[in-house]
Amino acid sequence: MGHGIGQVFAAAGYEVTLYEPDLARAEAGRARIGASLERAVTKGKITADQRHEQLERVGVAASLADAARNADLVVEAVFEDEQVKQALFAEVASHAPESAILASNTSSISITRLAAALPAERRARFVGMHFFSPVPVMPLIELIRGAETSDEAEQSVRDIAAELGKQVIVSRDRPGFIVNRVLMPFLGESMRAYEEGLGSAEDIDTGARIGLNHPMGPLELADFIGLDVCLHIMEVLHEGFGDPRFAAPPVLRQLVDAGHLGQKSGRGFHTYPRDK
Ligand code: CAA
């Protein structure tokens, strides 16, 4: 999601620096922003000059020190591994200005536990800033306050979100926060319904699309999010609440074990491009 997050900041006038441990990946992220802006030009949503200006605001850094040194805000969007995120934030804290807000785009990991990796004086300015895919399209940011997040940090993130044109909801720091807490049982139940042969994947999705006016059916949405990501979030919810209604369905585990991760691998509950 990193490039999508970078794109919305650049569009709002911020100077953005992308960092990946491998510089080529950061450059690929910048190229994806360029391609996305190119589509926006083709559709007449922005001018070619605006594309140029926005892309000019996006740079890449060869080191984390270079990326963080002058940052007002650091948004982390690495894969969902608590230890990896903690190690990253510990390093960011050694380079970023004291005044910087440090934010995680985690979809389910405890903000309080991530903050624990930081020096104590940094924790008040640490928050969850959860974006939704595709980031340029989805107008929501879920703001998560850890145990030590300050009112000032919350207000700063609210002000930034307003500049990005995103609406904010605030969640307490509980597994899955608000959106995934309500989404994952829906996706999980849809997978169980599919597994027991209640209906075809197509009919389950059509039911939600046409009958509930959802933009995507639940199986299609799980494929879009990534089945490995869904599995991880369900595991966090199940472990956090100890409630079987959050348990991942066997069909989800089996697809992930087989490497069928949804859209990104070409196959999940559906095959891609869509087998309509
Ligand atoms: N980047 C930028 N713009 C994009 C885009 C992308 N990756 N994908 C689609 N768009 C834009 C298109 O350009 C198009 O814009 P216009 O209407 O202005 O032309 C618009 O979105 C609609 O796109 P399409 O016509 O191609 O396709 P669509 O109408 O089928 O919509 C969709 C695609 C926006 C993805 C829609 O199906 C949708 O809203 N799906 C649900 C997405 C959702 O629920 N996301 C949240 C997932 S949960 C999550 O992210 C968090 C988590 O922790 C798991």
Image (cartoon, grey):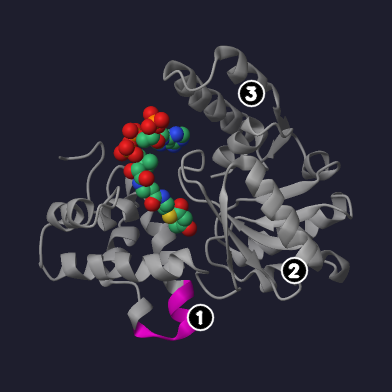
Q: Residue at x 46, y 64 (%)?
A: 179
Seen at 27% across and 71% down, the residue is 250
Q: Position of residue 134 (x, y in %)?
A: 46, 42
The quarter holding residue 113 reads bottom right
Where 17 falls versus 86 (above or below)? above
- Residue at the bottom extreme, as displayed: 242
Helix, strand or loop under label 1: helix
Residue stretch rendered in magenta on the structure: 236-244
Residue 75 percent location from the top left of the image: 68, 50
Q: CA distance from mark 3 to mark 1?
A: 41 Å
Residue 260 appears in view: no
Left or right relative to 228: residue 211: left
Magenta region includes residue 48: no
Horizontal and vertical percent position of residue 252: 30, 64
Asked which secondary structure carries label 3, the reply is helix
Position of the C terminus by quadrant: top left
**Which circle's residue, 2 or 3, is located before the other in the chain?**
3
Question: Mark 1 is on which residue type?
Answer: Gly
Which numbered circle lies on residue 149? 2
Return the mark for residue 55: 3
**Mark 2 vs mark 3: in front:** 2
User: Which element is circle 2 on?
Assistant: loop
Q: Earlier in the sequence, mark 1 or mark 2?
A: 2
Q: Is the residue under label 3 in contact with that under label 2 (CB below 8 Å)?
A: no
**Quadrant of the displayed image that contains ligand 1:** top left
Query: Where residue 240 is drawn, which disc sits there?
Result: 1
Q: Is mark 3 within 8 Å of ligand 1?
A: no
